[in-house]
Every structure is written in structure tokens, then in C-alpha cells.
Amino acid sequence: MAFEPPQRLVRALGETAPAGDDWLARLPAAAERAVARRELTVERVQVPGGRSSLVVLVRRADGTPAVLKLAPPRARPESERAALAHWGGLGAVQLLEAEAEDGALLLERLHPDVSVRSLPEAKALLEAAGTLRRLWVAPPAGHVFETVAERTGRQAVAIRAGAGTDPEAAPLVEAALAARAELLAAPPEQLLLHGTFRQSKVLSGERMPWLAVGPDPVVGESAFDLARLVRDRVEDLIATPSGPSTTRRRIKRLAESLEVDQERLRGWTLFRAVESGVRARRVGREKDAELLLEFASWL
């Protein structure tokens, strides 16, 4: 079959691709080789799929359903592999292949169209938070995962540069950078984190009711991981007059349920929202930028 990447993936990777990158052009052939090497039977490409990888629903030679995932090197697939191996299926999708020369990931098949976002909001937050708690473990000895300080350091450089051409966002950028500096001055813990956790990253499974997928793992404090969950369904929050108060209650509820310091969660939520908003504006996603920066102004 033809492995044409979904348009969502094409658009997302096009926003971040370095000059001369031809990974998308090479993707169909790479997928063919990955399928043949593993003697897989293809069912379909997952559509709309994700923003950083091609996800193919397959069956192994013995008929077992599985997922084949191909991502460009800049999406750090080997870091994802290492994290999934360390979690060993506890709270996260199971890795079915320890190593792969081609960098593709062969994973346990979950229900790709059923995430916790399908649940009512309160229940979705509860289930997502419970899943996230299981992922917060000590990183392996001698790990090479990026740290929160390193990742947010790169992001801080980018958002400061963006603020120079966007005076409207400058006060929020300064507040976000100040929050980051304060938070990194005395981090309370160093745990292995999902890194990009949100409701859509938690899928229904057979082995366990809900399992996390698609980590971009990082080592740092749990409040950093939880911060992205705070702004889930941000478009709904923005659309209601009670959005600011709902956000504050959500921070309080999540912090208390997962024993995370409320002010640290608020600070990382601010930084991550501003970083995402400035990045969205930089690549021309103005509607997303407006939503994220308005959300950040409530914090």
C-alpha cells in the first residue's frame, strides 16, 4: 500500500523542518522497508494521526495487532524507546521491540480512536492524572534524557527572541521567564516525565483501561509534566466567562490530587502556555497563539 503521510503531519513537520530536510519525502519508502523487515501486515495509516510521526496499524506474523511508528530524528524516537522500555508497560504503551536499526517503534495496539478526551471533563482529568502518576519514576542510572532545565533553556531563548518582534506578548514572556528562573533555582525532585502529556495522549487499552502514548521524555519535577494537562480543552475554557476561575480551580484540584506544589504548578503552566503561544505565532498559527496567550494571562 502507499504510505502517504496525513496532512496534519505534513503541516506540523513543515513548520519545524530545517532547510534541506527531506524526511517526509523519504517516509513512504522507509515505511515500506520497516513493514517488510518485520513481516507485518498493514491494516491502515492512522488518520488524522499525530503531529510528529506516522502511525500505522499493523499485524505481526502471528496475527497479533500492533502499531508501527516512524518519526524523524528531531522527534527523538530513541529517547521515546528508552522511556517506554524503562516504564515496562506500567502506565504507558508496551514496547514490543527493544532495538531497531531503522529507528521505527513497534508498539502494543491500543484503541487509537478512544482517548480520555471522550470522557466528561472531570472524569477525563481524573483518569489522565492517575495515568500520569504511574509514569513518575526515578530515571535509569546513567540516563541520557534531556532535563527540564535543558529543554526549557532552549525554549527560553526562542521565546525571548519572539518577544522582540511581538511587543504585545512581551510582558507575558518576561513573567514566564521569571517564573522559570525561580522554579529552576530549587527543583524538588528529578523524575522521568512524559514530557508532552495531555488528555489526547491517553488511549484506551485491553491490558489496562488507560495507557499513555507518545512521550517526549524529560527528567525533572512532576509539576512540569502536569502543567500541560492544566490547559487541556483550552478552547472551551476561553469560550466561557468562568474560564479564569475554572483554570484556578483546576490547578488547585490537580495539585492536591497528585501532591504537587500549587504555586510550582501555576508557574510551569504559565511558562509552557507562553512558550506554546509564542511558538504558534512564530509559525503562523495565529488563532492558537491568541488562545494560549489569553490563557497565560489568567495565571
Image: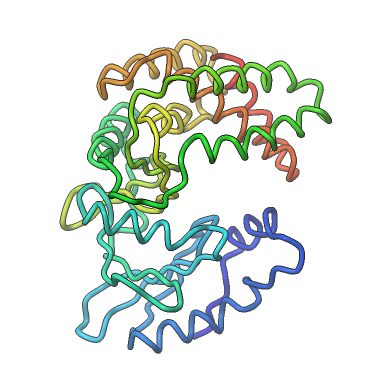
Q: Position of residue 126 (x, y in %)?
A: 27, 30
Q: Residue furthest front?
A: 142
Q: Could you tell me which residue is drawn at 23 percent across and 47 percent down?
A: 91
Q: Position of residue 140 (x, y in %)?
A: 28, 49
Horizontal side, residue 150 vs residue 84: left or right: right
Q: What percent of the width, then of the height, locates residue 156?
A: 64, 32
Percent x, y of residue 227: 44, 28
252 and 142: which is toward the camera: 142
Nearest the eye: 195 or 7 = 195
Classify 216 as above or below 8: above
Left or right relative to 81: residue 62: left
Quarter of image, res 74: bottom right
Compared across the picture, whether 232 is left or right of 119 comes to right
- Coloring applied to the structure: rainbow
Height in image: 115 above or below 2?
Answer: above
**Is 233 placed above or below 257 here?**
below
- State the residue at coordinates (51%, 62%): 53
Name the quarter where the C terminus is drawn: top right
Q: Taking 276 as reference, is 70 left or right? A: left
Q: Nearer the viewer, residue 120 or 248?
A: 248
The mark total stands at 0
